[in-house]
Image (cartoon, grey):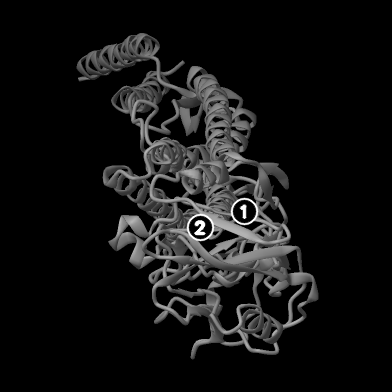
Amino acid sequence: MSLAVTLANAASGLSVAQAALATTASNVSNVNTPGYTRKVVQQETRILAGQSAGARALDVTRIADQFVASQAREQAIRLGRSDMLAAIHQRIQDTIYGEPAQTGRGISSRLTDLLTSLDALAASPHQVAARSEVLGRIEATLSTLTADLAAIETIRSDVDHQIGQVIGSINTDITELAAINQQFSRGYGSADLEDRRDGVLARLAGRIDIQVGWQDDGQVDVTTRNGTVLLDGEPRQVVYEPASSTGPGSPLGRIAVYAAKDIDRATGLPVTGARSDELVSAGTRAALSQELAAAGAEPVVSNLRGGSLQGLIEARDRVLPELADQLAELAMAVRHRLNAAHNDAATSPPPATLSGTRAGLAPTAGFVGSGTATIALVDRSSGTAASAFQLDLAGFTSVDDVLAAVNTASSGAVSASLDGQGRLVLASSDPLLGIAISEGDSAIATSDSAGHGWSFGFSHYFGLNDLIVDAPGGSVGRIRPDIAANGFALATATLDAAAGPPLVASLGGKGDGTGAARLAAALREPGSVVARGGLPAYAVSVTGYAADITSLAASAAAEAQRVATGDQALATDLATRQGSLSGVNLDEEMSRLILYQQAYSVSARIISITDDLFGELLRIAG
């Protein structure tokens, strides 16, 4: 072998050792860089004219397992969804129910406090403090229900806007992948660029369920699981406009994918007539309640199965609406049952005029009733019943029949009329005589689009002695203003009626707590509710239903956390497997540094010796 060949071999070894040292140094410096994979310099022997001509360094390659990386992306898709759902369930628990140690915060605690105060009032109806306590507890219950429903809508609105933010991040990832693809297509691919590409894919998988197709030159194609293209040569753009309102019946826009050329750069919205692929349909929510279905609302249908985007959609369109349905059902039950009991009670002394709350009635408005109610005129000073008469609802077919029957049966002592807002008004012709009503077995049946089969007593149907009335501003209701202003307007007594003949009626005095006891019983006794969310149609007390809502929400939160914890454990395991193969081990890298330094020193020594030999030859030749 000539000295020239020896020098060339040593120089090539020096070059290879330099490349290996640089790559190893890069590994060491990036030991804590997320997503970095260990790099190695491949080398091979150079052959010229059938003879060894030293070594040469090939491209720097990554130590990576694409199968494990693919499994990690699959797990990121599952974790993105479960982690998001767990976070939203936890927010619901923190916002509505509070921590377990925070007693008295949830609606169950409010109802328990209300029951305790009603029991105390039934025992001491003459005490002002007991009446004030009951009114305060009722107000707290209504306020809590109103606040809980408002909180759910706030969370739902936040989730809807978060959907818009996640979609913005998805579009950023797709654009970045398109730029990386362009680098590979121009032949500028590198191991570091592959790291960057894999990092973007992992991030994107956590946001939306994707499938990745690989091209020979390192470019990737990205589609969703249902085949919607996100990146195929040209990037696509996902478009969604968050709703301005997320009320129970508010419409939500669709989530669709458009070609980049179909997006107006000035507005960020698709141009008119642009074709799109739909990821999530427009609608109101995932599963329609009976009243929304009756109103012709459309359900939201998602073609996604994983990623944080799907977790947000499930929370917005299923978890939160179903909880709102349950709380709204509870609010209706509280109002209906307390009003039913209050209408079957009376104040002592009773008022000379009873004004109904059911508005919009016409004399010809029909209804189907049954049973008998008793109306008595009571001396407001002595509490003695001066007269009484009964109304047989089975014979009535319209409001006009009610008006005529009251005016006739009372011989003019009580006038029945409709006011300007179509509400029933009963007025005593003698201001010294008050009006008290016993519902008896009277019943007026109604139904609504939600599937409720309501049953009202005579007074309850017309709202002649309601305790809870409508309130402005989206509240579930408020205490009737005159009762809120005067605790003794709270009906704690009852009118006892014996059909006879003759008909005998008597009203308890201020010490009569039977009306208050009926209010407490209204919360304890079972009544029917319609199916809401995960709760079926069944007979349950108001307190029991509140406890079931709380229990179901806590169970759902615990299950969501369990799934997220399991998904996180598997994601961590896959990351550990990736790290054991692709991660940088400082001890190993330091060993390689020593090896490459020795190789470099050997090559340098050979060059030095060869240089000395060349010098000696030149000296001899000279």
x and y, in percent, of residue 184 in the image: 52, 52
Residue 154 lies left or right of residue 325; in this view the side is left
Which of 214/61 is in front? 214
Please name the residue that numbered disc 1 is placed on.
Answer: 222
The picture places residue 606, in percent across and down from the top left corner, at: 32, 13
Please name the residue shown 58% across and 50% down the image.
326
Q: CA distance from mark 2 to mark 1?
A: 9 Å
Asked if 605 appears above or below 618 in the picture, the reply is above
Please state which of residues 573 and 241 is positioned toward the viewer in this rendering: 241
| Residue ID for mark 2 | 174
Q: Can I make out residue 18 in this image?
A: no
Q: Is the residue marked by circle 1 packed among few (<14), some (14-19), or many (20+) residues within 10 Å?
A: many
Position of 147 compared to 292: left or right? left
- Compared to residue 462, the image places residue 579 above or below, namely above
Front residue of 592 and 134: 134
Please state which amino acid type lies under the numbered disc 2: Ile
